[in-house]
Amino acid sequence: MRRMPWLVWLAGLLTYALPAQTPCVVTQPTASFKISHVKKAGALNADPRSAAWKKAKSAWIAKDCSKTLDYPNLKTEVKGFWTDTDLYLLFICPYET
């Protein structure tokens, strides 16, 4: 437990050293995502080109609104559909490593 004071000191230093990000302001119109109803989900998998996801509606996430920064390299596609009992979402996220 001797290292605990150093961790507290480091956390305090980072709090003052890193600039704070102000939250973004949401402007209208906001994005919308309308998804289709299907009777049965069928065989699910993570392949966006498969029969399960081929006809699913999609939308894009390109900004983290908890900060005022854009992250163009993290643009994510979201596909979705719903049944009488469940909501199905597939996130297609880019990555480099």
Image (cartoon, rainbow, N blue to C red):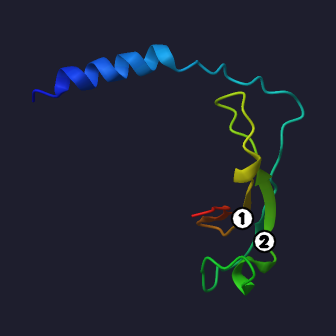
- Above or below — where is 49 with respect to 19? below
The foreground one among 25 and 52 is: 25
The N terminus - image quarter: top left
For marks 2 and 1 on the same chain, the one whose residue lies earlier in the sequence: 2
| Quarter of the view holding residue 6 | top left
The foreground one among 25 and 1 is: 1
Separation of marks 2 and 1 at Cα, in angstroms? 6 Å
Spot occupied by residue 60 in the image (x, y as percentages of width and height): 79, 54
| Quarter of the view holding residue 46 | bottom right
Which residue, given by chain and number where applicable, does mark 2 sit on? 56
Spot occupied by residue 56 in the image (x, y as percentages of width and height): 78, 71
Spot occupied by residue 89 in the image (x, y as percentages of width and height): 65, 63
Q: Residue at x 49, y 17 (%)?
A: 17
- CA neighbours of label 2 inside 10 A, class few (<14), some (14 to 19), many (20+): many
| Quarter of the view holding residue 13 | top left
The amino acid type found where label 2 is placed reads Ala
